[in-house]
Image (tube, grey):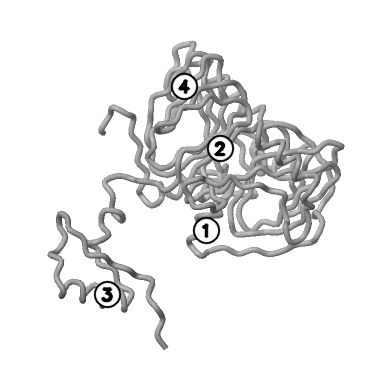
Amino acid sequence: MTTSSPVRINATDGPGQPERTPQLESLYRGFESESLVPLWTEIGELMPAEPASKAVPHLWRWSALLPMAEQAGGLVPVGRGGERRAIALANPGLGGRPFVTPTLWAAIQYLNPCEDAPVHRHTQHAFRFVVEGEGVWTVVNGDPVAMRRGDFLPQAGWHWHGHHNRSDRPMAWIDGLDIPLQYFADATFFEYGPDGTEAVDTPKRSRAERLWGHPGLRPLTHLAPTPATPLLAYRWEYTDRALTEQLALEAEGCPATIEPGHAAVRYTNPTTGQDVLPTIRAEFHRLAQGTVTAARRETGSSVFQVFDGVGEIGVGQHNWKVERGDLFVVPSWVPFTLSSEVGLDLFRFSDAPVVERLGLLRSREEGNNA
């Protein structure tokens, strides 16, 4: 039984290309029939001089996202089958796929008052970041974790999880996952759990926080390293304090910021000191009033969400004024710069752990060829 080959090879004139002859055309037809592709016809696309991502810089306005999520809340049920009322950000350069970059997935999720999202688990690593609101608990392996403004809530793959809203108000937040990466690696698994949530408790502090949420202190009962963080909530008050102290130390003449007026922290796994998730890096950045960052290029892709303040963002040829809730994407090796006259807080996540472990992480300030 023969199968038609999708391979099509066109002889072209150009540097490094062989002379177009009937014999060459015959050879190319033979390659096609056997599903073979010669490198000399593809090298420019397969091995460009520098990264040329199919993803493009793009901005999503919170003022447009949130009303549509609210509308979906009145039209779309949450339950088994649809699982989540989550609306993915689709990068315009990726052909309509629900991917914000080739390796990352981001979505706004919306839960109505007194509504539950059913329990399931999947191999994709995930997190939730809350730009506004409270009242929802995410329940991870039976541990209810409160979600409040400014909180970062990571969740390793293959953990059972559902959500419940015990308030009288709806709530929206941002989900981030490595769905595209695992999808293209053909490594995804998914499993349904109970239709409801595992627990409907509403504690102020989860069991994970009670065990792991003490800065610099580690329980002697849990000394083995884990690939993902066991701490299920990184609370805003600690993030805010760390950033405030960095800028205060800078003002006192101490080297505490990554560049003048630019404070930043990385969320880390307390068992290793490394990234919170094997495939996702998460950070928080604060620009003081009047700060302009250096323009940088980095391999790998990033997504930013404005937590507070107003700023100006340059990504490639695009320049945007942004405010609370707005999200924008920085594709691989596209230069970007951040600035603010009044101050700007930004949550950031990226695929840097994967790129770094493959030995492919590279960055450069514009004007510096090192």
Quadrant in which the C terminus appears:
top left
Q: Upstream in the sequence, badge 4 or badge 1?
A: 1
The amino acid on which the numbered mark 3 sits, given as a three-letter code, is Phe
Residue drawn where x is 38% and y is 31% of the image? 296
Query: In front: mark 2 or mark 3?
Result: 3
Foreground: disc 4 or disc 1? 1
Q: Work out how far the residue at label 4 is from the one at label 2, CA to CA, in angstroms.
A: 17 Å
Q: Secondary structure at mark 1?
A: helix
Distance CA(mark 2)–CA(mark 3): 50 Å
Q: Amino acid at mark 2?
A: Tyr
Of the pair 219 and 79, the residue shown nearer to us: 79
Name the residue carrying label 2: 267
Q: Is residue 170 visible?
A: yes
The earlier-in-sequence mark between 3 and 4 is 3
The answer to whether 107 appears left or right of 137 in the picture is: left
Task: Please name which of the two marks, 2 or 1, marks the residue nearer to the observer.
Answer: 1
Residue 79 rendering spot, x and y as whole percentages: 78, 56
Which residue is depicted at the point 61% across and 37% down? 217
